[in-house]
Image: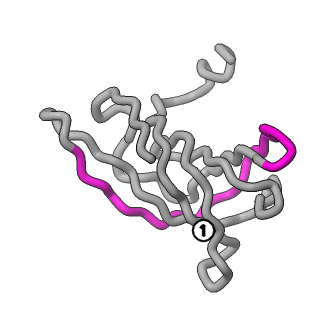
Amino acid sequence: MDSLMERRREKRLRYSWPIWFAEDFDDILTQGQMVDVSSGGAAFTCYADRCPADGDHITARFSVPKYEDDDSFDLSNFIREGRICRIDELGPYVRRVAVQFSEPLPFKPGEIIEHDVMCV
């Protein structure tokens, strides 16, 4: 896992928040659960029967907390197209999906203020 961390260009913000995705937004949206996000991509979990395939292009809608110095935060909402670059099998019913955005976010979520957010 250390070698994986060394390849990353920026810190990731780890948090648990809904993400909605589909091949395009004319399709039925599928809900996943965000694992982490950087300006260039995200990882999320979803049920295996609704999981996109490696190399698929999806459109995702999600929110990212943007922290202030006083520990408050606002949610910034995004819609991003991207390409699935990895699928990990976490169990018989759950997959972790890594997506690379076609357009980066306007800030680096993991480098604003270091926080671990566990939202339910």
**Vertical position of residue 13 compared to residue 82: above or below:** above
**Vertical position of residue 115 compared to residue 84: above or below:** above
Q: Quadrant of residue 89?
A: top right
x, y percent for residue 58? 66, 66
x, y percent for residue 30? 65, 68
For the residue marked with disc 1, what is the amino acid?
A: Thr
Question: Mark 1 packing: few (<14 Cα in 10 Å), some, or many (20+)?
Answer: some
The segment highlighted magenta reads 73-93
Residue placed furthest toward the left: 70
x, y percent for residue 26? 63, 85
Element under disc 1: strand
59 left or right, relative to 90: left
Pointer 1 residue: 59
72 left or right, relative to 88: left
Callout count: 1
Residue in view at x 67 percent, y 82 percent: 27
Residue in view at x 77 percent, y 59 percent: 51
Is residue 16 on the magenta stretch?
no
Is residue 82 on the magenta stretch?
yes
